[in-house]
Amino acid sequence: QVQLVESGGGLVQAGGSLRLSCAASGSIFSINAIGWYRPAPGKQRELVATISSGGSTNYADSVKGRFTISRDNAKNIMYLQMNSLKPEDTAVYFCNADITVVARATVNVWGKGTQVTVSS
């Protein structure tokens, strides 16, 4: 069984920074595409940022220039560095990954989320 566990959320003032982490554990052969998501009005979850296995990144327009997604493949940990935070960034942040398990099947896994609250 594979699981993702997020950490690093908290309360921060507008203009501050946080770094979220997402640790993968279990019978992992490789981790493919990874993403961070948050709830949005009218949507279940909106994409915040993604990074491919090759390192290509994609960001929502609302976070471009402020957030940076990265990964440590050796440790199976993914990060979201969030700078210049705004009150509208307040949300529960979820990580998601396509993971190839030892048996060579690919599964899509969600973490349980970490709360980020930005005060004005």
Image: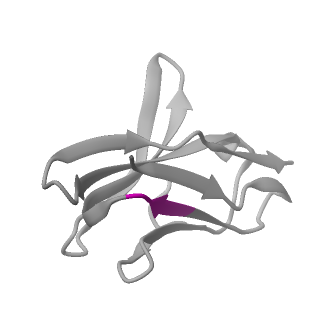
Residue 19 position by quadrant:
bottom right
Start and end of the magenta stretch? 22-26
Residue 117 at x, y percent in the picture: 78, 46
Image position of 22 with respect to 42: above or below: below
Q: Residue at x 67, y 58 (%)?
A: 7
Judge whether residue 61 can be spotted in this image.
no
Give the vertical position of 19 relative to 48 (above or below): below
Q: Quick one: which residue is furthest to the top in this view? A: 42
At x 58%, y 45%, the residue is: 93
Which of 108/54 is in front?
108
Question: Residue 35 placed where, x, y %?
Answer: 38, 53
23 in the magenta segment: yes
Q: Is residue 50 magenta?
A: no
Q: Residue at x 70, y 42 (%)?
A: 90
Task: State the predominant SS element of the stretch in magenta.
Answer: strand
Q: In this rendering, does residue 55 appear at all?
A: yes
Q: Residue at x 35, y 78 (%)?
A: 73
Residue 40 locus on image (x, y percent) = 52, 28
